[in-house]
Image (spheres, grey):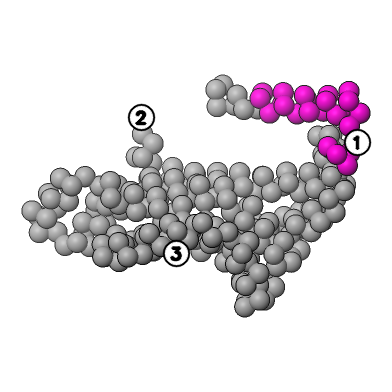
Amino acid sequence: MKRFAWVGVLAGLLLAWEAWVDLRSVPDYLLPSPSGIASALWDERSTLLSQAAVTAREMLLGFALAVILGLGAAILLQRLPWLRSAVYPLLVASQSIPVVAIAPLLVIYLGFGLSPKALIVALVCFFPITANALDGFASAPAELRSTMRTLNATPRAIFWRVELPWASPRVFTGARIAASYAAVAALFAEYAGGSGGLADSMHDQLDTQLVGAAILLLALLALALFGLVTLLERVMIPWAREG
């Protein structure tokens, strides 16, 4: 029952929200009611689902790119300590650069297609995966590495048999964090580069019910990707959650 406690909390919040709007007679353009958002979601379901499919494609492609590049960068930096010392501080510093500052440049160089949007999502999701993977590699017990060396294991064997399995839970932690960013990053990319995605339904800020419906779908996309990563973790490294 504890697993579904959030359902009761969510239902209570929605009821309180609905009651507040009704009892206070709050105009829709200031705050739409949950029932109004649900009505807009149903009335515009075809358009919203089509837009959500576009946003999902951008989100998934960017997230996949971030996983490949982030994990690849972490492996490279782990294998080359001198490169990590030179590059990692720059990666940390790069997080202070707002994506809004470079998104227009990506659109100028790459156009208004899928590529700049996926790249923007990848840039947002890249660092959590890289940082968590590096921390996971570093946390592998030194005694396990020493034992492998006494068995004449090569650095590559030590990586695949000790460091990577030990780091896998951290890698998935970083992937879950990145998954929670991916949907919003895709929406921002659509604002920057134009798209048929959910950003199209948010341009008219006065139609708050439609905006609320688009936000709801965006949240569902984020939850779906988060759940997918969690499911993959349970399938690929079941031992990480034992006990």
Mark 1 surroundings within 10 Å by alpha-carbon count, few (fewer than 14), some (14 through 19), many (20 or more) = few
Neighbourhood count class around disc 2 (C-alpha, 10 Å): few under 14, some 14–19, many 20 upward: few
> Residue 165, can we see it?
no
Instruction: Specify the amino acid type for callout 1.
Output: Pro
**Going 62% across and 78% down the picture, which residue do you hit?**
109
Could you tell which of marks 3 and 2 lies nearer the N-terminus? 3
* Disc 2, SS: loop
The amino acid type, in three-letter code, at marker 2 is: Gly
Say whether disc 1 or disc 2 marks the residue closer to the N-terminus.
1
Asked if residue 113 lies left or right of residue 145, the reply is right
Numbered disc total = 3
Determine if residue 221 is in view.
Answer: yes
Tell me the SS state at disc 3.
helix
Which residue is denoted by mark 1 in the rendering?
27
| Circle number at residue 95 | none
| Residue placed under numbered mark 3 in the picture | 69
Residue 10: within the magenta?
yes
Give coordinates of residue 131: x percent, y percent. Answer: 40, 53
Q: Position of residue 54 (x, y in %)?
A: 70, 61
Where disc 1 sits, the SS reads: loop
Foreground mark, 3 or 1, reads 1
Give the x, y percent position of residue 17. Answer: 78, 28
Q: Are marks 3 and 2 in contact (CB under 8 Å)?
A: no
Camera-nearest label, 3 or 2 = 3
Residue 35: percent from left, percent from top: 84, 34
